[in-house]
Amino acid sequence: MTVATKAINVFIADPLSEDGIAPLRQQTGLDLNIIVDTGLTQDELISKIADVDVLLVRSQTTVNREVIQAATNLKLIGRAGVGVDNIDLTAATERGIIVVNAPDGNTNSAAEHTIAMMTSLARHIPQAFNTLQNGKWDRKSYVGVELKNKTLGVVGFGRIGVEVAYRAKGSRMNVLAYDPFLTEERAQELGVTKATVDEICEQADFITVHTPLLPETRNMINKDKFAIMKDGVRVINCARGGIINEDDLYDAIVAGKVAGAALDVFIEEPAVGHKLLTLPQVIATPHLGASTIEAQESVAVDVSNDIIKFFNTGTVTSPVNMPSIPKEKLAQVEPFFALAEQLGKFLIQVTGEAVKELNVSYAGEVANYDVRPLTANAIKGLFSTKQGTHVNDVNARYLAEQIGIQINEHKTTTAKGFTSLITIEVKTENETHTVSGTLLNGLGARIVKVEGFGVDVKPEGTILYVKNTDKPGAIGRLATKLAEKEINIATMQVGRSEVGGQAVMLLSVDNAVATEDIAYVTELENIDEVKAINL
Ligand SMILES: NC(=O)c1ccc[n+]([C@@H]2O[C@H](COP(=O)([O-])OP(=O)(O)OC[C@H]3O[C@@H](n4cnc5c(N)ncnc54)[C@H](O)[C@@H]3O)[C@@H](O)[C@H]2O)c1
Ligand SMILES: O=C(O)CC[C@@H](O)C(=O)O
């Protein structure tokens, strides 16, 4: 992760709570240049984003691939809210841009809004008020239904879904809940009944959706689901437009199947003039679920703090596109970061072919930790010879998998004499190479095995990797030839399988080694292969 030394341009593209961004304005440790420029068209945003380090948005601004491509300095996208469907996560991940959100800050407001919408729907409050404003005292048209003893189906039982259920139970409703991660135990603990989406459709009087908008959740409530619902069902969407198919909902209302719908969100926003808004059974708000003073302050504070944390420590609290690892756990593996990267860097220079498989084995103490950042560092090392590729914890695994590298992690508690041992193996079409490294108490990082042969080399500077046949004179002749080329050997390590067999030498040398010098020494008898590794 980069820790900035120059001014950091923070571009706020949607209206955010001033109190919420106070942490950014008040912090003194970082040189932040805060630009607030809201309501921009896509083209305007693109024209202003080249020098931006941090882009902060709510749900209005679409951060698509084009925006991300134009943002050549971008390091972090902050979403002051939950849903990240307005951000192209793949494009951000490819570029190594971390995306953070504020998953907790607006939960309560969104749940309260959902309950307000459900109650308004049950009692026709907006329609009745509208009639009254138009000068009519109409008590007959707006006979509602009670919530008590009705069944509410909650599809998507995460933060908001759960809070909605608590409140619905307060209104003495029976709650059915569906979520792929909901266990029977947790359902019981929360006093709800675990159900499938179809069971909810068949049994519920009110159905509310609280999933993110994903390929699997888009149109999950569609004409097939409306067909199995109870007549007179009421539906609520305070999550994302598109989870309930809008055309199918329209048809189901017109057909009299659905008695009413309460919508805070639409596929296209602003949804002014939407055909659903012409139906008297529909009540709607313009995406106000998170629009409270409290929620807006809270989400903006959360992302602001994450921005500060990122530039101070390289870690964040709420990452969307990389594993979230608590600070204490990260601290356990941090000492191994450079070693893992050097091992990857070493092996990519040993192998001459495209890597197909990367196996990273963790033995001893290190195997007890969350090693995902170490594997990311090993991949970073593998990519070190690929000029122009910016690899970091966010995109390392993604980039490797994109080019067909299979990544495997293995853990074992025994490290054969070492406290911790990291072994990296790369497989190509024709070759397999391995290198192991450790951290020696007080002495730092060491390469302790190459191709299975024991060695002891500092992973730094230039190292000559030599494969030879273990015959008398091979080492001497090599040293002489290197001396002829003015290449000074600092340390030499030899590992061999058996006397007279295959051997590997690692020579730390004081100077860079030119390609022609490699060719010169490779001609020697019993020297099979020589490579200069620059770490
Ligand atoms: N209207 C608003 O202003 C507003 C405010 C906040 C959040 N939201 C929306 O609400 C959504 C939910 O927010 P949250 O804070 O509860 O998020 P959350 O991540 O805590 O919960 C989402 C739940 O959906 C579940 N889920 C995922 N795929 C599913 C599927 N196929 N079927 C059923 N459930 C599935 C997840 O397992 C998770 O438990 C957000 O993604 C956001 O789009 C809207
Ligand atoms: O920015 C907003 O007000 C909407 C936020 C909301 O949709 C969310 O997903 O958090």
Image (cartoon, rainbow, N blue to C red):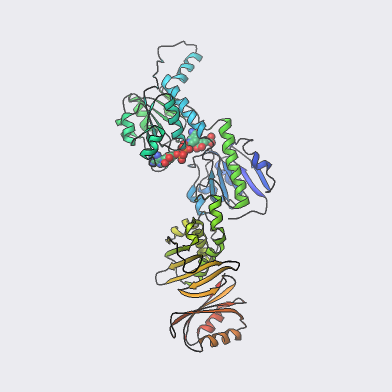
Residue that extends furthest to the bottom in the rendered view of this protein:
473
The quarter of the rendering in which ligand 1 is drawn is top left
Residue 213 in sight here: no
* Res. 57 image quadrant: top right
In the image, is 407 to the left or to the right of 442? left
Where is residue 431? Give x, y as percent: 41, 72
In the image, is 445 to the left or to the right of 274? right
Q: Residue at x 50, y 49 (%)?
A: 321
* Res. 58 image quadrant: top right
Q: Residue at x 60, y 55 (%)?
A: 2
Give above or below for 381 relative to 503.
Answer: above
Which of the pair 297/159 is nearer the observer?
159
Where is residue 360? Give x, y as percent: 45, 63
Where is residue 287? Give x, y as percent: 50, 32
Which of the pair 53/376 is nearer the observer?
376
Where is residue 285? Give x, y as percent: 49, 27
